[in-house]
Image (cartoon, rainbow, N blue to C red):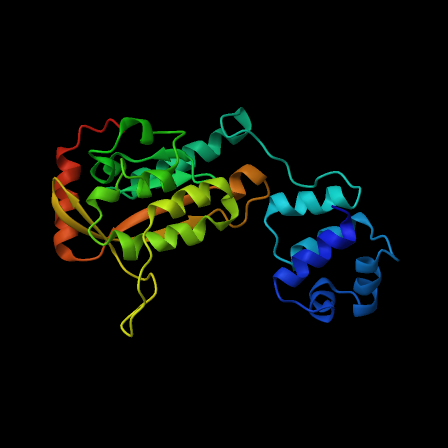
Amino acid sequence: MDFPRALRERRTSRRLSQLDLALRAGTTQRHVSFIESGRSAPGRGMVVRLAESLDLPLRERNELLLAAGYAPAYPETPLDGPALAPVREAIDHLLAGHLPYPALVVDRRGDVVAANTALEVITEGADPRLVGPGTNAYRLALHPDGLAPRILNFAAWARHIVERTLHLGALHEELSSYVPEVEVTEQHLGFAVPLELSSSLGVLRLMTTVTSFATAVDVTLAELKLEAFLPADAATARALRRGAAQSPGNW
């Protein structure tokens, strides 16, 4: 895709006018118009400013630079490489610090990078092929051989996962096939509902949180997400503390 079209598509997808983007990027609407029409070729610095002003993920910023004929600005370092060893150590620290509550770290596709031992209570009974580093957390959540049979409010809860995977193409289609349609009523609260999960510790009611490495300047790191589960009631908190005390810690 050529740069003018790539810029225009990203701007319009964010519902920004040329003037809006110009003000954010510190330039004029006329200049943005000339760039999008191909009448003006922006310098590398302007491309970076436009990408920042659109709040693009780092991967897309690199793609925009390539479309404009420039080298990518942001490195994509292998997570298992020596340069990111301090990051891996920090991730382990974050996961351990979340105990006794379950937490995991996933990449941009939802593939599991790491998890703490408390996640065992979430994954118990799932097909082993769906569990562990390198497997997909979204597939684990919705697959009939994963968590789905144990999720008591599956139809209502699962939709937010499907909504989060719109960018994942074939995986999104696969996950959508596992989720039944939900009839919307006057009492509908969207998908802001706790996960209700049967387990060996009893029924767990869990809220989910997602944390990203917002100030990262490496593509790999910027695309990681810490997905954490928090108890939605006192009974769940007690059950998770009890489960952590009994866990062999083999995840």
Occupied quadrant, residue 4: bottom right
In the rendered view, tell whether residue 16 sits above or below residue 78: below
Occupied quadrant, residue 96: top left
- In-front residue for pair 175/223: 175
On the question of residue 49 being in view, the answer is no
Question: Which residue is pictured at 17% across the width and 32% down the height?
Answer: 247
Question: Which residue is pictured at 45% across the width and 45% down the height?
Answer: 172
Q: Is residue 186 left or right of residue 233?
A: right
- Locate the C terminus by quadrant: top left
- In-front residue for pair 181/239: 181
Question: Which residue is pictured at 32% across the width and 43% down the height?
Answer: 142
Residue that protrudes farthest toward the bottom in the picture: 186
In the rendered view, tell whether residue 210 sits above or below residue 144: below
- In-front residue for pair 61/188: 188
The x and y percentages for residue 9 are 68, 57
| Number of marks | 0
The x and y percentages for residue 115 are 33, 35
On the question of residue 3 being in view, the answer is yes
The x and y percentages for residue 51 are 68, 53
Q: Is residue 40 left or right of residue 219?
A: right
The x and y percentages for residue 170 are 49, 40
Q: Is residue 119 left or right of residue 235?
A: right
